[in-house]
Amino acid sequence: MRGYVPGEQLNSPDIVKLNTNENPYPPSPRVFEAVRAALTGDKLRKYPQPLGDDFRRAAGRVLNIDPDSILIGNGSDDLLTILTRAFVPEGGLVVSPTPSYILYRELAAIQGARFETVRFTEEWSLPFPWPKPDADIVFIPNPNSPTGTLLPLGPGHLEPFADRFRGPVVLDQAYVDFAEDDTLATSAGWLPNVIVTRTLSKGYSLAGIRFGFALAHPDTIRELVKVKDSYNCDVLSLAAATAAIEDQDYYRGVWAKVVATRERMRVELRELGFDVTPSRANFLWCRRADRPVKPIYEALKHRNILVRYMDYAGYDGLRISVGTDAEVDRLLTELRSILAG
């Protein structure tokens, strides 16, 4: 197998890093207070809560759901791995739309399973009827990466889709905090074969902590607990995640700033000749009809600006994360220079 290749992690101070969809703003001040408190006494000497009960209670209050509907994970990638191990037999079938998150293919390979894709329609919706209902698991990233597009899969829209499948439908909501659609956040629990995965890496500025959670019917969560590592989230990540999920006022302000910058980026990138897909995430998918985009990616890297070049069997583009306004200004300035040359 090839193995998943993460985005470049070049973290020197002079690098403008717009390639891995990190939040450009710091975490809530409550997160730093919680981590400092977790370093006191003998907390590091002892094992963490195996199910993350404090976090589950806090998230249950915020999302208005049963804490027993929540499973914690070492980032949402850990949760995707747990789900694949739990539901997909060797020789089974994993399906996702394309282009989307490339990790799904590698999870199938690790499990010794087949991986097949279904192409999005030209309007970035899902084909109906879905052509592969016999999948053991279906991963639907929503909002999608690399496009940032959003499917109407809240209550009332998901039932006719999910009812067609033998296995679970997993809504991978890594970027839902930027979608400005609260109905998507809890699209689990009311359908027995729907599971939602979320992460605190993007919206909550905690990519360095590694924490995510899944939402599903409590009966499903009880079975998934059997598959996860006993202590898959450490004391510091649990403390940070609990403090973050409780500070919704702070993060609503952060999300609003990211969305405002995203819309400014979209307009200005289009003025520079890019075909920019309307996004509901914290990044933009940018393509060009007049020239290849890989040389643009390479020229930006030479100027210490990292974006993500992605190629889906000939369908390639640049996925550009939303940075601070100053970082976006620098990106646009360098792009004008590159395109003029």
Image (cartoon, rainbow, N blue to C red):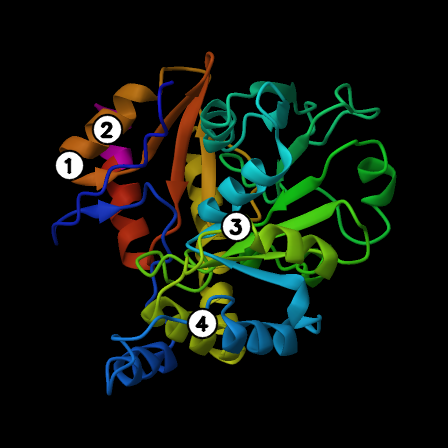
Q: Which residue position is annotated with label 2?
A: 338
The local crowd at label 4, few if under 14, some if 14 to 19, many if 20 or more residues have their Cα within 10 Å, is some
Q: Is residue 102 magenta?
A: no
Alpha carbon separation for disc pair 1 and 3: 29 Å
Q: Which residue position is annotated with label 4?
A: 49
Alpha carbon separation for disc pair 2 and 4: 51 Å
Residue 331 image-quadrant placement: top left
**Up-down relation of residue 54 to residue 196 (above or below):** below
Q: State which region is magenta.
A: 335-341
First reached walking from the N terminus: tag 2 or tag 1:
1
**Up-down relation of residue 54 to residue 201 (above or below):** below
The local crowd at label 2, few if under 14, some if 14 to 19, many if 20 or more residues have their Cα within 10 Å, is some
Front residue of this view, candidates 225 and 30? 225
Query: Residue 100: x percent and y percent?
Result: 54, 30
Query: Residue 296: x percent and y percent?
Result: 28, 25
Q: Which residue position is annotated with label 1?
A: 303
Q: Amino acid at mark 1?
A: Arg
Q: Amino acid at mark 4?
A: Gln
**Which SS class for mark 4?**
loop
First reached walking from the N terminus: tag 4 or tag 1:
4
* Labelled pair 2, 3 in contact (Cβ < 8 Å): no
- Residue sitting at 56 percent across and 78 percent down? 58
First reached walking from the N terminus: tag 2 or tag 4:
4
Q: Amino acid at mark 2?
A: Ile
**Up-down relation of residue 315 to residue 320 (above or below):** above
Q: Which residue position is annotated with label 3?
A: 174
* Labelled pair 2, 1 in contact (Cβ < 8 Å): yes
Alpha carbon separation for disc pair 4 and 1: 45 Å
